[in-house]
Amino acid sequence: MSETEFSTSFSDAEINKNFENTDFFSELMGGLEEALAYEKGTARAETIVRKRSLPDVNVSEVRKSLSLTQKAFAAVLGVSSRTVEAWECGKTTPTPTAKKLIYLISQDHSLIQKLLPQ
């Protein structure tokens, strides 16, 4: 088995300077303690990065509520009409970014005017 090699444009001196005041053990222990506190439900709010759940969107319903064809809706979102078709029939799901955009459009139909191709 061959060793993996990494290359960098930084010199050894630059790398050492970057980690000069870092106590890796303390950093690792701190992270583990935060993870344990999170698991126990006792973590401080400022130490937790909350991943927001994405809203559920029904692509077909949103598109139809806007009276748009799949082709027109695809143009607004910057995707192909086949992508919209795949979302609507359940073959694939929108990316997180597309899902957020579709959700925002469903909440404020006036966004369509801003997103229409010029």
Image (tube, rainbow, N blue to C red):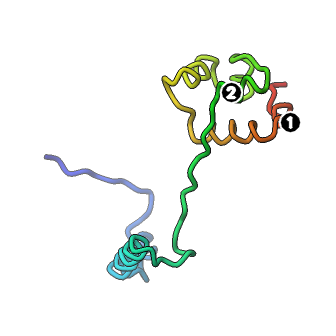
At 76% from the left and 26% from the top, the residue drawn is 65
Give the quadrant of the C terminus.
top right
At 56% from the left and 51% from the top, the residue drawn is 53
Categorize mark 1 by other alpha carbons within 10 Å: few (<14), some (14-19), many (20+).
few
Three-letter amino acid code of the residue under disc 2: Glu
Name the mark on residue 39. Answer: none
Categorize mark 2 by other alpha carbons within 10 Å: few (<14), some (14-19), many (20+).
few
Three-letter amino acid code of the residue under disc 1: Ser
Counting from the top left corner in percent of width and height, residue 76 is at 74, 27
Picture quadrant of residue 64: top right
Element carrying mark 2:
helix
At 75% from the left and 37% from the top, the residue drawn is 105
Residue position for label 1:
110
Counting from the top left corner in percent of width and height, residue 110 is at 86, 36
Picture quadrant of residue 70: top right
Work out whether 59 lies above or below 13.
above
Residue position for label 2:
61
Please state if 29 lies on the left or on the right of 49 as rendered.
Answer: left
Query: In 3D space, how far apart are the residues under numbered discs 2 and 1 (Cα atoms)?
Result: 17 Å
Please state if 29 lies on the left or on the right of 41 as rendered.
Answer: left
Q: Tag count in the figure?
A: 2
Work out whether 38 lies above or below 86.
below
Counting from the top left corner in percent of width and height, residue 23 is at 37, 82
Picture quadrant of residue 82: top right
Given residues 102 and 13, the one toward you in this image is 102
At 41% from the left and 65% from the top, the residue drawn is 11
Q: Earlier in the sequence, mark 2 or mark 1?
A: 2
Given residues 63 and 1, the one toward you in this image is 63
Element carrying mark 1:
loop
Please state if 58 lies on the left or on the right of 5 as rendered.
Answer: right
Between disc 2 and disc 1, the foreground one is 2
